[in-house]
Image (tube, rainbow, N blue to C red):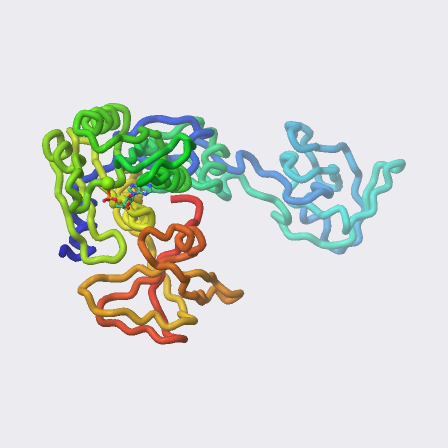
Amino acid sequence: MLPLDDARSHVLGRVAPARPRPVALADAAGLVLADAVVANETVPPFDNTAMDGFAVVAADTDGAPVTLQVIGTVAAGAAATTVMASGQAMRIMTGAPMPPGADAVVMVERTIYDEGAGSVVVEIEVPTGNHVRGAGEDIKPGHELYPAGTQLTAGHLGVLASVGVRAVDVIPRPVVGVVSTGDELVDDGSRLAPGQIRDSNRRTLLTLLEESGFTAVDLGLARDDEAEIEKVFRDGADRCDAVLSSGGVSMGAFDYVKVVLDRIGDMRWMQIAIKPAKPFAFGLIGDVPVFGLPGNPVSSMVSYELFARPALRLMAGMRHPQPPTLRAISADPLGRHDDGKIHFLRVEGGPDETGRWTVHKLGGQGSHQLTSMAQATALAVVPDGVDIGAGDEVGIIPLGTLGT
Ligand code: AMP
Ligand code: MG
């Protein structure tokens, strides 16, 4: 059996980030920058007020209260053209540009405005620059905003919008095809004939891909038939950046997936020292990565988390493709027998108000028992030879969080 880390390194070593392309800011959320972005503009673009109040000459407020002559109003969006002199003030609204000559703002709450008299009493002394947001305080032209490799979040996109960037060069989201294989599978809602089961893997895998921020393509169901399997894999490799299949990678007698992929691809067939998801195949058809996930429903999901998701994240340009392992307290004993494998147990739980996770072991840990996988909020990682008692710490991989 191949150690998990070796299998994962093998896979990650054979995939690479996709070719960059420009996308509009509106389509860039979650994508990774291919190049650094440098600001061409100044933010704020001009000196402006952080408060509603009165623009003043700071020195005029010495010995406040003082009365100043109000010579006009500047609203946000207006150009400040009136030049102010000592003894004068202007009403000013948050975001409005500072009038030339003014160097401070007194908040409206510390003033008494007499509209009829055209004057204002300023109650407090203010220093130069009071409540003034200086031009370029946040961003100056030529400043490198974000390096290549940054995954764009709402805040990043807001900053890019603030400097007038309308498109960015990013690593595109991988387009990933999903095919189920097996003669026993039914996907059309018809009554099950003896020996048949319904295809669930395609639904889970397509959904996992979409949840991870990739673009999922349904390649359908292929019978255990060489020609049909070849057609679906070739079609997938033509249309997609990667293909996920489930089924046909274990030791079964009618597993044509192996026959076909060995003929049209460059594959490695692995038995990995983990439970579930021991059988796994990975390779390339041309330059398109193919992930041969095991057919058992839980195994296909675990295999996705351990191999496919990190590899697809790497293809999407992410610098840290591996899932994080958090520490949790196991409320239940996670005893296991020694079999040379790392066991991934389905557990339910979450963080308390201090952020500390406590997890409970779920019943029904068979690799065909998908209900416990649906209920699980994490996989507990229990290495060979480790005996975890109730109240002990255990490593967990959180599941089901939206986003890559
Ligand atoms: P295989 O990897 O093809 O040997 O399949 C292992 C087990 O997973 C068998 O019990 C299959 O019936 C089951 N299985 C394979 N593909 C699917 C699928 N798409 N949905 C649900 N179960 C599946
Ligand atoms: Mg099969």
* As drawn, 209 above or below 382: above
Q: Residue furthest right?
A: 116
Give the residue displayed 24% in from the left and 27% down from the top.
232
In the image, 312: left or right of 9? right
- Which quadrant of the rendered structure holds the C terminus? top left
Count the labels in the image. Answer: 0
Ligand 2 falls in quadrant: top left
Front-most of residues 123 and 247: 247
Q: Position of residue 326 (x, y in %)?
A: 37, 62
Task: Evaluate whether residue 404 shows in this view.
Answer: yes
In the image, 313: left or right of 225? right
Q: Position of residue 286 (x, y in %)?
A: 15, 29
Task: Evaluate whether residue 32 shows in this view.
Answer: no
Front-most of residues 263 and 131: 263
Give the residue displayed 42% in from the left and 56% down from the top.
376
- Which quadrant of the rendered structure holds the N terminus? bottom left
Give the residue displayed 64% in from the left and 41% down from the top.
49
Q: Residue furthest front?
A: 194
Front-most of residues 383 and 322: 383
Q: Position of residue 250 (x, y in %)?
A: 18, 46
- Residue 84, quarter of picture: top right
Q: Position of residue 41 (x, y in %)?
A: 46, 32
Give the residue displayed 48% in from the left and 40% down from the top.
154
* As drawn, 327 above or below 208: below
